[in-house]
Amino acid sequence: MKPLRRLMSQIESQTEFDNINWSVIADPKALPSPGPVTNEDMLNAMGSTKAAAQAVSFEKYNKWMNEFGSV
């Protein structure tokens, strides 16, 4: 998300929203780019993202695997 936030910040700082001519198609080469995802972006994301799975007991799943093999 950080690259997209950087991109939105660039767009907001470089655009005069009151003076946009909506009938003119923008040149894609002239638009800012979000740039690459950096190690810092990844570390920030991992530090602020919650796990998708709740901390549950996997005992019943392990028992199933031991009894029946793969799911």
Image: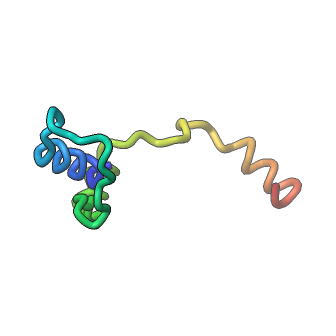
The picture places residue 41, in percent across and down from the top left corner, at 26, 57
Looking at the figure, which quarter contains the C terminus?
A: bottom right
Relative vertical location of residue 20 with respect to residue 67 in this rendering, above or below: above
Residue at 15% x, 37% y is 19
Relative vertical location of residue 40 with respect to residue 46 in this rendering, above or below: below
Looking at the image, which residue sits at the far front? 23
Residue at 15% x, 32% y is 18
Along the horizontal axis of the image, is 31 left or right of 65? left
Quadrant housing residue 15: top left
Q: Nearer the viewer, residue 41 or 27?
A: 27
The picture places residue 33, in percent across and down from the top left corner, at 26, 61
Relative vertical location of residue 53 with respect to residue 62 in this rendering, above or below: above
Looking at the image, which residue sits at the far top? 18
Looking at the image, which residue sits at the far right? 68
Q: Nearer the viewer, residue 53 or 66?
A: 53
Residue at 27% x, 59% y is 34
Q: Give the mark count.
A: 0
Along the horizontal axis of the image, is 17 left or right of 23? left
The picture places residue 45, in percent across and down from the top left corner, at 32, 50
Along the horizontal axis of the image, is 19 left or right of 24? left
Residue at 78% x, 48% y is 63
The picture places residue 70, in percent across and down from the top left corner, at 81, 60
